[in-house]
Amino acid sequence: MRTTIKILLFVAIAILTYLCFMSILTPIQFEKVRTQREKEVVQSLINLRIAQIEYRDQNGRYTSSIDSLLDFVKTGKKKVVLKEGALTDAQLLSGLTEKKAVSIVNRGNKREIAEHGLEGFRRDTTVVPLLEALFDNKLSLESLDKLKYIPYSEGVEYEVDVNNEYVSSNGISIPLCEIRAPFRAFLMDANRQETLNLIDLQEKLEKYPGIKVGSVDEPNNFAGNWE
């Protein structure tokens, strides 16, 4: 009987030790996974923000359709200025400006160009694919297609809302956009209970339970809630 009791006590102690260990380890492991996944979600949101801002600049409004946004990036063009050389402090103090320097160079008078020290100065405007202009070839067409989906979500798309009719108290029309990735979409498979605890905490703090950028309620400079 005593041997049986000892065995049961040993098993109980082992179980309690394991549970205590896991109660400490589980949140640590979850935070590690959460940090890594949030980093990828944030980068995706930054890329979507870049695309939306360009869409707004060219169209005067945001789009609530990610498909339309990505098609815009795939097929769009953008004028960029290719720059060679820079004006020195001495040139600027002498009254030379970028506009004046460009005008001198464009006239093609070699003597005038030399007098102003603009031999290596060049400003050319060219049209390039929007994907290249916005992301400097850091995004391929394949990765662009994946941009509509929240990382680790098994195909869940970002939630996008726009408010293109917002008017400030000054009477200024300001298009607004908000893009969201709820925790539930990209963390549940890591640890369901820890994710639910995180969501509950955010809701009690009256904060969005996820990662988002922008706002459709008021202008916030298209800032992310991680910034």
Image (spheres, helix red, strand yellow):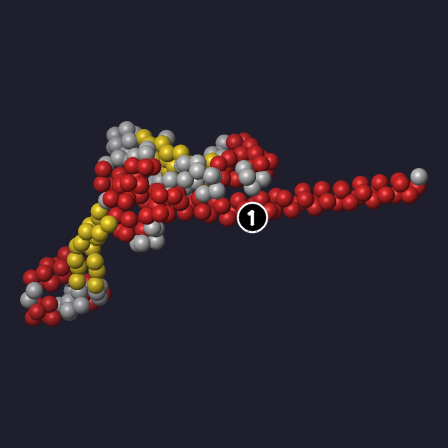
Residue at figure coordinates x 7%, y 64% from the top left: 108
Residue at figure coordinates x 60%, y 47% from the top left: 29
Q: Which of 137 and 120 is in front in this view?
A: 137
Hey, which quadrant is residue 64 in on the image? top left
Q: Which of 18 and 24 is in front in this view?
A: 18
Q: Nearer the viewer, residue 132 or 194?
A: 132
Q: Is residue 106 left or right of residue 201?
A: left
Element carrying mark 1: helix
Task: Give coordinates of residue 219: x percent, y percent.
Answer: 34, 35
The quadrant of the picture occupied by the C terminus is top left
Q: Residue furthest front?
A: 142
Q: In this view, does 59 lie to the left or right of 137?
A: left
Task: Give coordinates of residue 87: x percent, y percent.
Answer: 20, 64
The quadrant of the picture occupied by the N terminus is top right
| Vertical comparison of 206 with 151: above or below | above
| Vertical comparison of 164 with 83: above or below | above
Residue at figure coordinates x 16%, y 58% from the top left: 124
Task: Give coordinates of residue 181: x percent, y percent.
Answer: 44, 37
Q: Residue furthest right?
A: 1
Pointer 1 local density, CA inside 10 Å: few below 14, some 14–19, many at least 20: few
Tell me which amino acid carries mark 1: Lys
Task: Give coordinates of residue 198: x percent, y percent.
Answer: 55, 37
| Vertical comparison of 180 with 17: above or below | above
Q: Name the residue under label 1.
A: 32
